Image (cartoon, grey):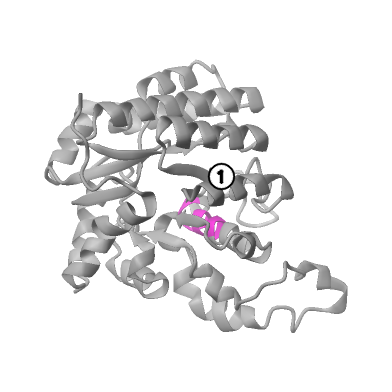
Amino acid sequence: MKIDAFCHLIPRRYAERLAALGQTAAAANIRTRVAGIPSLVDLDLRFRQMDEFGEDYRQIISLPAPPPEDLGEPPVSREFARLGNEEMAELVRRHPDRFAGFVAALPMNDPEGAVQEIDRACNELGALGVQVYTHVNGHPPDEPRFEPVYARMAELDRMIWVHPSRNASWADYPTERRSKYEIWWVFGWEYDTAVFMSRLVFSGVLERHPGLKVLVHHGGSLVPHFAGRVGPGWDQLGSRTPPDQREDVAHYPLSKRPIEYFRMFYADTAMFGAGHAVRCVIDFFGVDHVLFASDSPFDPEKGPGYIRATIANIEQLGLSDTDRQRIYEGNARRLLRLDPTPASAP
């Protein structure tokens, strides 16, 4: 079986509620997404696309951007998180032969509400974990107010899925107002994700919660490809920092080399057909920390393209049957506590 651990879907009621926000940036975004990628909402089309990969292909679904906190103040973000989670839970219940589970959305601009939604989604709705973004309305993920979210996820032993969230308003140069040529997406998202990981490492989140499971989208971003800088580079942290900038390198007391914390993250295989990159991801994180994922349906075919390409990448790596099984299915079942076989739809 192939369990695709990072796929996006918009339940129809959620899409309709989001569109009802009116002439807001979020509403315009969702209209563009639905119009351009119909299988985000159209389940009949989505299932026809999934049929190409056989009866043993399943998806773990999560909402795409925008995150709930971008939709409004805490009452609004809480409403959207609850609605999205309820709708995704219902889709998993109705279609266990298609969906292995769902990842809950959180209103991260309301940390207390986020913890409440973690408990509701994971304990009542059956969420496999939660999705967070690389920043919260521009705020870093290691602000003390977010500590209860990490603590609760560690206590529940549930996975955190990490999705990038930079946009074109984050300029490429200080002298410009907006990012050009979608650099903010192609390279910016991966930079943002690496920054997210770094802030969790040096703020001590993984030191305080060593069992915390964090799945980083797009193969762990830049980290495996720049392991030399992450390793020997950060081993020298502060050694060349001027005295008047020492506060810039002050960090939580760490008991290990920085690179060892980065290896504690989990990564997916959503590298858009770049097989050499998937190999690098496996080499850095290890087979037991890599989950098969495609990022469907955001490929040029609007659904099956990245699934097909990612499977081809894995098949061409020369992995043993045991290692392929771990990446395709075994790691997801072990880490997410999935049942050995999906139940039949009622």
- Position of residue 185 in the picture relative to residue 195 (left or right): left
What is the magenta range? 185-193
Magenta span main SS: helix
Task: Report x, y in % for residue 17.
Answer: 47, 18
- Position of residue 316 in the picture relative to residue 71 (left or right): left
State the residue in front, 92 or 36: 92
Q: Kindly identify the residue that appears in the image at 48 percent across and 30 percent down.
A: 29
State which quadrant residue 287 falls in.
Answer: bottom left
- Position of residue 18 in the picture relative to residue 206 (left or right): left
Residue 339 among those drawn in magenta: no
> In this rendering, does residue 65 appear at all?
no
Q: Kindly identify the residue that appears in the image at 20 percent across and 68 percent down.
A: 322
Task: Report x, y in % for residue 82.
Answer: 50, 26
Task: Report x, y in % for residue 127.
Answer: 41, 37
State the residue in front, 37 or 139: 139
Q: Kindly identify the residue that appears in the image at 86 percent across and 78 percent down.
A: 243
Q: Kindly identify the residue that appears in the image at 58 percent across and 26 percent down.
A: 78
Q: Is residue 278 above or below residue 237?
A: above
Give the residue number, with chain letter if any, for mark 1.
Answer: 168
